[in-house]
Image (cartoon, rainbow, N blue to C red):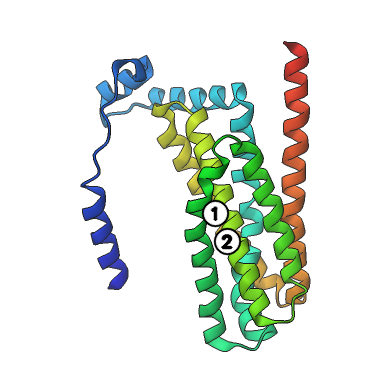
């Protein structure tokens, strides 16, 4: 009931947002075509939309990095989501109060990330990758921590790094994607990430019965680090090849 009430309150807040008018220069031919068709979108239009999204991804190296992040990270996200409760109850013996404490630290870190996200406005790509690397290192460190309050602090910084990284990459995606393609692209990425996270959490729940929780946490943190390194190497080499061709 409280959750439903919060959605209703959010709706009231959102309906009062005044968006700046879109000028004619900001509306492309594709925008006009989409608006003129309204909700009656044909099968051919959907195929055209997908081809335009693929073309946009091909020509934008930063967008390729964001897509790679969105495709790979959800495979690991399920591990740290499952381990929050496991760490609180089994490893730190804090019971239900420990679960609440860890989630409170995550919430505080997420709130703080909105204040720090603007500091990376001129280096969105590097900021996102560095935050992903830092998140992995912190998760690896968390697997070796014995003190509960140290774990609370680490969870705060994990959420802080993750929030700043998400701000950087989401902003980069919107900058690199035409307005009329942002909705379909974000929808596809969200559907993918949420589905994979669910599968990842199920797999982590099975794995935690076989592998020690701290070892599983170490593996999850190492996964974040590896993804960050692989994406950075790909971006560096692709940018070098692009500069050589120019």
What mark, if any, has residue 66 been given in the picture? none
Q: What element carries label 1?
A: helix
Where does residue 38 sit, x and y in percent of width and height? 25, 28
Reading the image, the residue beneath label 2 is: 159
Specify whether 110 is left or right of 127: left
Specify whether 53 is left or right of 12: right
Q: In the displayed structure, would residue 124 be above or below residue 227?
A: above
The crowd level at tag 2 (other Cα within 10 Å; few <14, some 14-19, many 20+) is many
Structural distance between the alpha carbons of marks 2 and 1 = 6 Å
**Which residue is rendered at x = 72% and y = 46% of the image?**
228
Question: For this rendering, which residue is in front, 191 or 146?
Answer: 146
Where does residue 78 sit, x and y in percent of width and height? 61, 62
**Which residue is rendered at x = 39% and y = 27% of the image?**
180
Quarter of the image that includes the N terminus? bottom left
Question: For this rendering, which residue is in front, 172 or 234?
Answer: 172
Q: What element carries label 2?
A: helix
Residues at discs 2 and 1 in contact (Cβ within 8 Å) = yes
Where does residue 85 sit, x and y in percent of width and height? 59, 77
Quadrant of the rendered image containing residue 119 = top right
What mark, if any, has residue 163 been given in the picture? 1
Quadrant of the rendered image containing residue 229 = top right
Res 89 seen here: yes
Quarter of the image that includes the C terminus? top right
In the rendered image, the residue lying farthest to the top is: 246
Res 202 seen here: no
Quadrant of the rendered image containing residue 64 = top right
Where does residue 243 sit, x and y in percent of width and height? 74, 17
**Which residue is rendered at x = 21% and y = 47% of the image?**
15
Question: For this rendering, which residue is in front, 123 or 236?
Answer: 123
The crowd level at tag 1 (other Cα within 10 Å; few <14, some 14-19, many 20+) is many
């Amino acid at each position: 009931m409280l959750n439903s009430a919060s959605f209703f309150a959010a709706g009231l807040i959102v309906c009062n947002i005044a968006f700046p008018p879109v000028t004619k220069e900001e509306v492309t031919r594709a925008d006009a075509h989409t608006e003129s068709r309204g909700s009656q979108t044909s099968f051919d239009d959907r195929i055209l939309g997908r081809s335009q999204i693929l073309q946009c991804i091909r020509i934008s190296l930063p967008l390729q990095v964001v897509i790679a992040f969105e495709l790979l990270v959800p495979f690991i996200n399920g591990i740290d989501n499952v381990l929050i409760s496991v760490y609180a109850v089994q490893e730190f013996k804090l019971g239900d109060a420990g679960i609440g404490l860890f989630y409170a630290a995550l919430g505080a870190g997420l709130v703080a990330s909105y204040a720090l996200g603007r500091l990376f406005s001129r280096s969105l790509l590097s900021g996102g990758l560095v935050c992903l690397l830092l998140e992995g290192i912190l998760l690896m460190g968390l697997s070796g921590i014995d003190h509960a309050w140290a774990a609370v602090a680490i969870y705060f910084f994990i959420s802080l790094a993750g929030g700043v990284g998400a701000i950087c990459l989401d902003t980069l995606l919107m900058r690199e994607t035409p307005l009329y393609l942002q909705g379909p692209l974000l929808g596809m990425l969200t559907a993918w990430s949420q589905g994979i996270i669910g599968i990842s959490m199920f797999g982590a729940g099975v794995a935690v019965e076989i592998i020690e929780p701290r070892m599983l946490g170490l593996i999850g943190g190492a996964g974040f680090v590896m993804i960050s390194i692989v994406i950075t190497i790909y971006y560096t080499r692709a940018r070098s090849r692009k500069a050589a061709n120019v």
